[in-house]
Image (cartoon, rainbow, N blue to C red):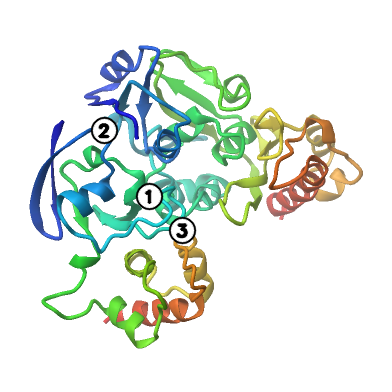
Amino acid sequence: MATVSMTVNGNAVAADVEPDTLLVDYIREHIGLTGTHVGCDTSQCGSCCVMLDGDSIKSCTMLAVQAEGAEVTTIEGVADNGEFHPMQQAFHDNHALQCGFCTPGMVISAIDLAAKNPDIDEAGVRRGLEGNLCRCTGYHNIVKAVLAGAQAMKG
Amino acid sequence: MSGFNYHKASDVADAAGKSSSEDALPLAGGMTILPSIKLGLSDPSDLVDLAGIGDLKGISVDGDTVTIGAMTRHADVAGSADVQNAIPALAAMAGGIGDAQVRNRGTIGGSIANNDPAADYPAACLGLGATIVTNNREIAADDFFKGLFETALDSGEIITAVRFPVPARAAYEKFPNPASRYALVGVFVSDGPAGTRVAVTGAGANGVFRQGDMESALGGSFSADALEGISVSEGDMASDLHAASDYRAHLVGIIAKRAVAAAAG
């Protein structure tokens, strides 16, 4: 067992875990934040995306011990005092989800994509979301939402 | 996952020492080793994390050479103005690996140490005539890749950097598997101080390889037309559920022409 400490959504957290504990399991089972989903568990679907030190990553393909000292933001941490993040609002406005399982990862990836590419176009969104799968095949509205969210994030 | 011990190496010597036992593995970005462990394809006794070694990160350009630290992430290579200026084909190649999240974790050193037969970086190293620098020696890319998931690295040998000679022209084209984004066929071509090179990934039954007939033809005339009529041996190609060997052989010709046209353009 090793004690792993990090900052999750602005809060310092620590837990004793085995070295083979995945970051997603640390977040869900040790910290109790279950908004980060496990879909494929093989780093393909992107449901488990979280922000790690400013970059979106797949938390099913990272060990908790590798995140020692990191700043992690999960879907629970993107809203601001009860106000949706502009990207969450854009997903809501554009009905960019059906079952919602992929949505936390989609929103995290989209925030990262838009933050780094403020003037992104539709092709860029489609390419940028290659690591996130929606099995309801709702990509059309997701792409519309990410374009709208990117505009909103520019303020 | 099966249990393993985790160590965070303090420097390269520490990493080499801790990963020298037979069942220990260095851990770079983890984009292959962690899925492999989860699938039961790999069962290391110890993982030696290289992420804390600052010396292994970063990009520098010195005259006609681009040097990339082994722990430099794909996203950093893709976004580097230095690499974009010196070897735009290399930056573009790095920007096309996997997906955004893979590029935010995966590293050049991890990719080439793993030598997946469908990975992009082996083609770039072979196609540009790179030199792989380790804690013990320097290895020419031509001598580094030894078949499927095999390299010239010894146990406990740690890649520290990769040096790329700046070519006069180069390009990488790939036909990605639509699901995995790995190269079904990828061809890196270059022309410059390291000669005229055509390196093919994804297609070969024995991993990344140079296509000598194409290199000879391009040495005479660096144009897509020069590749007309050159056939690739079907018997040397991989065949699996994603593509049969004859289809891969056909694609090598097509993708090579596109790469040459992009480089020559």
Disc marking residue B195: none
Mark 1 touches mark 3? (CB < 8 Å)? no
- Report the front residue among B35 and A155: B35
Residue A153 in view of the camera: no
The span from disc 1 to disc 3 (Cα, nearest Å) is: 12 Å
Disc 1 marks a residue whose amino acid type is Asn
Residue at 16%, 56% (x, y): give it: A32
Q: Position of residue A51 (x, y in %)?
A: 27, 57
The subunit carrying tag 3 is A
Q: Residue drawn 32% across and 65% down?
A: A108
**Precedes in sequence: disc 1 or disc 2:** 2
Q: Amino acid at mark 2?
A: Gly
The image quadrant of residue B205 is top right
Q: Is residue A8 left or right of residue A128?
A: left
Q: Quick check: A145 left or right of B6?
A: right
Judged by depth in the image, the label closer to the viewer, 1 or 3, is 3
- Per the image, the residue denoted by label 3 is A131
